[in-house]
Amino acid sequence: MPIRVRLDRLLVQRRMSLTELADRVGVTIANLSILKTGKARAIRFSTLASLCRELECQPGDLVVWEPGPPGEPEDDGLEG
Amino acid sequence: MRALGPGSVSSFLKVILDVVRWVLFVSAGAGGLGILAVLLLSFNPDLLGGAVDIGGVHLEGAWLGPLLAGTLLVWVLYMAGAIVIVGRLRRIFQTLIAGDPFHPDNVRRLRVIGAALAVLELGRYLTAATLHLVSRALHLERLHVGGEINLTTWFAVLVIVVLAEVFREGARLRGEAELTI
């Protein structure tokens, strides 16, 4: 998926640990790790708002669109 | 009464399936031992009493042992198919008890159940056709063959296939929800 999450860069810039952010936002570290490693499929507006509040940034600073290699699907889809 | 979770209808049904599974195992085991015994005794047909009456059909002679062994083999194969179905059902019920009906593995389990049902039904036709040929060859006119097409079974197979697709979609949505932060 060509959507990239820049959480790691923002954490470094804000000198904040993942644990601290998880405490402040009220999201588990496991879920934040999923978000950080780009494995997340979707993000709730409420989570996005909390992250932006704590990281003092705009949604566009956190989530960016980068064109992937030709032929890469926009949505990978999850097979059961 | 709740449908999911511990102490629910699902856990009650799983207990029943556990019992049924053991009964099936015992039946299959008894059938296997029966095949062994019949094959051993067929070397000396007199030990089998020389003749057997099954469903009003009188069997005797050199074909007695192989016929009985074949009948028992069909029984064991049928039990094996039933064990496959009940085993998969048990695992599905385990996920229901755990409150997770859309576990991704349930899709494969439902497909296996559907396929096993279809194979059992086709096996029934094959058995009936074989019995028909044997009864003609041995002039056993009173032998009931019973190879009628059972529409209920085929509808059940169709329903299970559709259900498997529903579960596949459910599992996909579950995966999406799990990865939604």
Image (cartoon, rainbow, N blue to C red):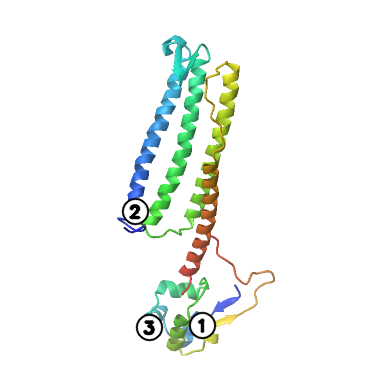
**Quadrant hosting residue B25:** top left
Asked if B124 appears above or below B37 in the picture, the reply is below
Disc 2 chain ID? B
Residue under label 1, please give it: A9
Disc 1 chain ID? A
Q: Which of marks 2 and 3 is in front?
A: 2
Residue B69, numbered circle:
none
Residue B9, numbered circle:
2
Estimate how packed mark 3 is, as few (under 14), some (14 to 19) or many (20 or more) residues with alpha carbons within 10 Å.
some
Estimate how packed mark 1 is, as few (under 14), some (14 to 19) or many (20 or more) residues with alpha carbons within 10 Å.
few
Quadrant in the picture for the N terminus of chain B: bottom left
Three-letter amino acid code at disc 1? Arg
Of residues B55 and B74, which is closer to you in this image?
Answer: B55
As measured in the structure, the alpha-carbon distance from the residue carrying label 1 to the one carrying label 2 is 50 Å
Of residues B51 and A78, which is closer to you in this image?
Answer: B51
> In the image, is B15 to the left or to the right of B171?
left
Of residues B36 and B156, which is closer to you in this image?
Answer: B156
Three-letter amino acid code at disc 2? Val
Could one spot residue B158 in this view of the protein? yes
As measured in the structure, the alpha-carbon distance from the residue carrying label 1 to the one carrying label 3 is 18 Å
> In the image, is B153 to the left or to the right of B90?
right
Three-letter amino acid code at disc 3? Arg
Disc 1 and disc 3 on one polypeptide chain: yes
**Which residue is found at the position 38% from the left and 60% from the top?**
B99
Disc 3 chain ID? A
Estimate how packed mark 2 is, as few (under 14), some (14 to 19) or many (20 or more) residues with alpha carbons within 10 Å.
some
Q: Is mark 2 on a helix, strand or loop?
A: helix
